[in-house]
Image (cartoon, rainbow, N blue to C red):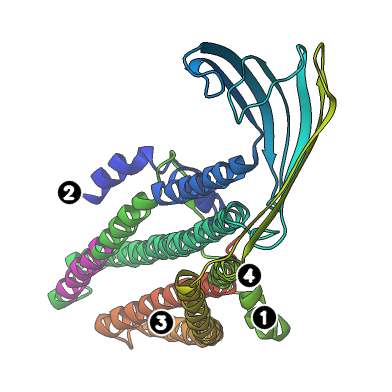
Amino acid sequence: MRFESFLFIIHSLFPAQNVTLETFLDKVEQGFPKLRAAQNAVEIAAAKSKEKRGAFDPVLMVDTSALRYNSSSTRGKALSTQMLETTVEQTTRSGAKVFAGSRLNFGSVKSPGSSTGELGEYFVGVKLPLLRGNGVNQKSIAEAVANLEFGQATEEARLIRLNVRLKASEAFWEWVAARERREIAARLLNIAKVRADGIRERYERGDLPKIDTVEAETEVRRREGGLVKAERDIEKTLLKLNVFLWNGPIGTPGSLPKPALPTAEELEAAFSRAVAQRPEARIISAETKVIEQSLALAKNERRPSLDVVVSPGIDTGRNSVGATVKAGVFYSIPLRQQTADGQIEQAQQKLEKIRQDEALLKREIETEVQDATSALRRAYERVQANVAELELAQQLELGELIRFQEGDGTLFLLNQRERGTAETAARLVDVIAEFHIAKAALRAAEGGLN
């Protein structure tokens, strides 16, 4: 496929307008499936947190029944009773249950049920755990863990976003560099064509030997091959960019920005910023807190159960008794603790493992930041060296051109000088692109690519 045909096919993706790295990354974030899937995971975690929070929703309970039965007090005589009880119950995060309701029992009430006045009994009450479940219980821990997992999912989405933005940034700078290399190759080819036409005219006038026309035409073909390769490089980078584009066209880029090295203070502060901002560190922190919650629950399970219930009320209507009260104490103690002990041991070992993981992560972050910082500094130094090399190559090319025009030089040497200048310029383009890629890598290592 010719390069012009390829450009026509991708024109709908890249209309003629300038685009910066940030505008490109904005387009990536708007439609890239991996980022949308990561956001879906966050929404799932939020829904799970909402589910666990539902354990503390108030509950309305209605119990109604009608009985016809053989009473033990008057055996052989059928009796009947009707019973209706309505209660609203609320479980709190501390483990206490508060409730309020009414009951209406009339007829021949079967033991252990109790009769009420004709207008019913109205009551409030609380069931309070004093040992096991007091402040730490399965429902409150489940909610806390779900909230932590929501935060963890958010940081995992940030991590995916960082990786996607880094890879997209690399693809973007490779694309910009490929376009500039093609411009260099096109200019080099244009010079060769113009010179070949001039040498052909001079040959036809008898001013130059035929070997010069062969040399000039050979150089044109060589540079045409270089242009084809440069066009292929653009095609590859465009296809790589297309992986990230799912939300419409972005445009065409300008030239590579001039490298600007961050200050020494900024580079030295990179590690502290990385530890504070990297999603991996926050994910480990959330995992630690989840395990700590599980450990607290396991320790709570080793405690005996002691619950107190108090429910005062008032009986109303004809045949009522006025004030009523229900109170009780419920106590139980496990005779063996293997379940809780096993859970405690598991949690403690998990905490130790995650401490080791955290220590390793900090070392990896430090190394990654140091590597990115080194790459950035060295790329900047290479840019300076290549700029100086390009200036010298241009001087050599200009000198060789003057010699050729004065008849002291050869076309072969002039072509070599021009190719040398173009190759140096292309290397400079690549090094500048490497600088910007290294800068993106440093920002990613720090935990931010905004």
Query: Height in image: 11 above or below 214?
Result: above
Crowding near pointer 4: few (<14 within 10 Å), some, many (20+)? some
Secondary structure under tag 3 reads helix
Name the image quarter holding residue 123. top right
- The percent coordinates of residue 346 (x first, y second) are 46, 76
Q: Nearer the viewer, mark 4 or mark 2?
A: 4
Asked if residue 225 is among those painted magenta in the image, a careful observer would answer yes
The quadrant in which the C terminus is found is bottom right
Going from N to C along the chain, the mark reached first, 1 or 2, is 2
Left or right for 239, reference 203:
right
Q: Circle 4 sits on which residue? A: 277
Q: Circle 3 sits on which residue? A: 397
Q: Nearer the viewer, mark 1 or mark 2?
A: 1
Question: CA separation, marks 1 and 4?
Answer: 9 Å
User: Could one spot residue 237 in this view of the protein?
Assistant: yes
Secondary structure under tag 4 reads helix
Q: Which residues are magenta?
A: 212-228
Residue at image coords 78%, 24%: 122
Q: Circle 1 sits on which residue? A: 272
Question: CA separation, marks 4 and 2?
Answer: 46 Å
| Residue 1, numbered label | 2
Going from N to C along the chain, the mark reached first, 4 or 2, is 2
Q: Nearer the viewer, residue 236 or 186?
A: 236
Crowding near pointer 3: few (<14 within 10 Å), some, many (20+)? many
